[in-house]
Image (cartoon, rainbow, N blue to C red):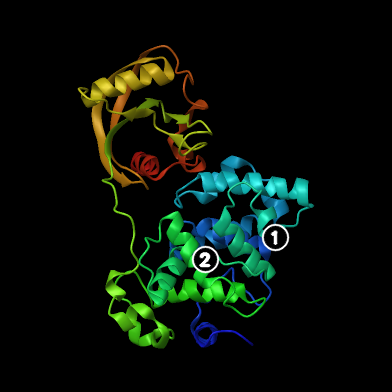
Amino acid sequence: MPNTPPWVHALLEWYARHGRRLPWRAARPDPYAVWVSEIMLQQTRVETVEPYFRRWMARFPTVAHLAQADEQEVLRLWEGLGYYRRARQLLAAAREVMRRFGGRLPAEPAALRTLPGIGPYTAAAIASIAFGRDALALDGNLRRVLARFFGIDTPIDTPQGQRELEARAHGLWPPGRAGDFNQALMDLGALVCTPRAPQCPACPLRPWCAAYAQGRVATLPRKRARQAVPHHTVVAGVARRGAAVLLAQRPAHKMLGGLWEFPGGKVEPGEDLPTALRREWREELGVDIAVGATLGTFRHAYTHFRITLHALEVRILHGEPQPLQAAAVRWVPITALEDYPMGKVDRLIARQLQA
């Protein structure tokens, strides 16, 4: 391996011995499996993804199987992974692969980036891991490891920091082994060079690491200052009709698009919970309601905000709910709620009703 730095040799040798054995990794990688895993792994931990990946591949073993799938089934299989736009884009991209590429995922990063849900990092990861292309895939683990290794002070979550990392690391691997280089750094960041309490004595890169030599492992990498995370109070109404309850489907273009929920929304300044819920049902469904007892209070954190949701019993006073701001509304037997894909909080309400 001429012109390959010694630390890269050490990294690849460490990876051969200690790299994680994951269901999407193989001696001859399946590009579709690599693609699915990379989409699932976006902002999601490996241990969370593994069972979802196995279920997904059992149900949709090829691009063709996925392209023929119903969106509701895709969302139901994805439920619990969050960031549901990823699932809808994966389905849309599979249909484009069938239409534009004859069912074969393209090998070049530029072509991959033309597909829904595939950005620069994901394109580089798929191209390098599945097709042996020489592309650097800078995920969070790589950014952290390389910032420490090179002693980079520029915040790694800025365009300048991204450019600096790419300039320092690009092309350091042996030709054709960018996939191993990327995965080795991913695993090193997950197992050894962790965000807190990194295991420097066990690190194969310690002899060459600038942060270790300078005593700055705890202060690198640098990131931009975080803004305060806003909090919203939310209400949801549970209306019953015999053994059924009313669900509304969120519009495809909105957050959690395509999922089903118990209708409601944010509490506006000056409103109490019943007032807010009556307003939301009038605006979204065109009906007036009487608000009853509290069924439960649920807290959840999304990427950019947090919510406290209050679920309340409601009774429709007159009229039939209409999907004024929803994609659809439906009376669903409580025993069939598991068939409808939902976000985490609505699933908690559903399971409480089922219990």
Please tell me how crowded label 1 is: few (under 14), some (14-19), or many (20+) other residues with Cα within 10 Å: some
The quadrant of the image that shows the N terminus is bottom right
- The residue pinned by badge 2 equals 166
Q: In the drawing, does residue 284 fall left or right of residue 289?
A: right
Q: Position of residue 188 (x, y in %)?
A: 44, 76
Quadrant of res 157: bottom left
Q: Estimate the x, y position of residue 211 in percent, counting from the top left.
A: 34, 77
Residue at left 50%, top 39%? 340
Q: Residue under circle 1? A: 108
Q: For the view shown, which residue lies furthest in the top direction?
A: 318
Going from N to C along the chain, the mark reached first, 1 or 2, is 1
Q: Nearer the viewer, mark 1 or mark 2?
A: 2
189 with respect to 211 (left or right) = right
Q: Position of residue 166 (x, y in %)?
A: 52, 66
Disc number placed over residue 173 in the picture, else none = none
* Residue 120 location, quadrant: bottom right
Structural crowding at the residue carrying mark 2, measured as other residues with C-alpha within 10 Å and reported as few (<14), some (14–19) or many (≥20)? some
Looking at the image, which is closer to me, 201 or 328? 201
The answer to whether residue 261 is above or below residue 275 is: below
User: Does the image show residue 237?
Assistant: no
State the separation of the CA atoms marked 1 and 2.
18 Å
Residue drawn at 57 percent across, 44 percent down: 88
Instruction: Name the residue type under label 2.
Output: Glu
